[in-house]
Amino acid sequence: MLPLLRARRSSAREQVASPPVVLHSDESLLERVQYGDDEALSLLLRRYGRLAYSIGYRILRDEGEAEDLVQEIFLRLHAEKSSFDCSKGVARTWIVQMFYRRAFDRRGYLTRRHFYSGTDIHDCANTISGSKCLEEDVIDKLTAQQLRAAFSELTDRQSETLNLFFFEGLTLAEIAELTGEDLKNVRHHYYRGLDKLRQVVRELIGNDKKVK
């Protein structure tokens, strides 16, 4: 038998004998973490660590603080009972919203202690002048279900841009490079999309007041 044929048959046997790769869902990993499963926590960290850092750096504007935020988030996730409810949305959306909330909480803490004295942390491509940035309004007030519903009202370009920004951790410049669009157009999709989401927030708050 030719060596090449033997090698191919051997490779085929190894593939048959090898156990199938099991892909763990975010939902199952979150559930396992609640029971103290360190391996599940490690898998979530590998899956979302880069995104957590990207969000942290974008909001905190400091590498050390972003790194500390990643550690704090996953240690806290391991130590505390998760509030995730699979009946209200997918785990990925809940996880990303948690990253944003923790980052905004940390930024507020640092601001109160004058960490940013002499620095305008709103002077970046991801924020608009005002007392609160649009990201914070949206992430802090919309549930996962409401966020998905709000995204369905956006144009395809707006939805794609915000998905890449919020859930993939890409910067506007990286989105422009990935999509082949001019950065000016990407910024337009980003801000128009966020403005639409903010309108949804206002409508939801207004409806809540009417119900009460």
Image (tube, grey):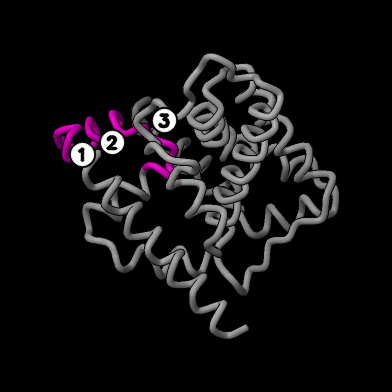
Q: Residue at x 41, y 30 (%)?
A: 7
Q: Amino acid at mark 2?
A: Ile
| Real-space CA distance between mark 1 and mark 3, rounded to the nearest whole angstrom | 42 Å
Which of the labelled discs sits on residue 7, or is there none?
Answer: 3
* Residue 69 image offset from top left, x and y in percent: 67, 30
Does residue 80 sit above or below 123 in this rendering?
below
| Real-space CA distance between mark 3 and mark 2, rounded to the nearest whole angstrom | 44 Å
Which residue is under mark 1? Answer: 179
Q: Residue furthest top?
A: 118
Q: Residues within 10 Å of mark 2 (few under 14, many from 20)?
A: many
Which of the labelled discs sits on residue 33, or is there none?
Answer: none
Residue 185 within the magenta-colored segment of the rendering = yes
Residue 191 within the magenta-colored segment of the rendering = no
Q: Residues within 10 Å of mark 1 (few under 14, many from 20)?
A: few
Q: Under tag 1, what secondary structure?
A: helix
* Residue 88 image offset from top left, x and y in percent: 59, 71
Segment tinted magenta in the rendering: 165-186
Q: Amino acid at mark 1?
A: Thr
Q: Which quarter of the image is occupied by the C terminus?
A: bottom right
Q: Is residue 22 something that shows in the picture?
A: no
Displayed quadrant of residue 171: top left
Mark closer to the chain start, 3 or 2: 3
Q: Residue at x 22, y 34 (%)?
A: 176
Displayed quadrant of residue 87: bottom right
Residues marked 1 and 2 touching at CB (< 8 Å): yes
Residues marked 3 and 2 touching at CB (< 8 Å): no
Q: Residue at x 71, y 30 (%)?
A: 71
Mark closer to the chain start, 1 or 3: 3
Which of the labelled discs sits on residue 175, or is there none?
Answer: 2
Judged left or right of residue 26, residue 162 is: left
Q: Amino acid at mark 3?
A: Ala
Does residue 191 sit above or below 108 in this rendering?
below
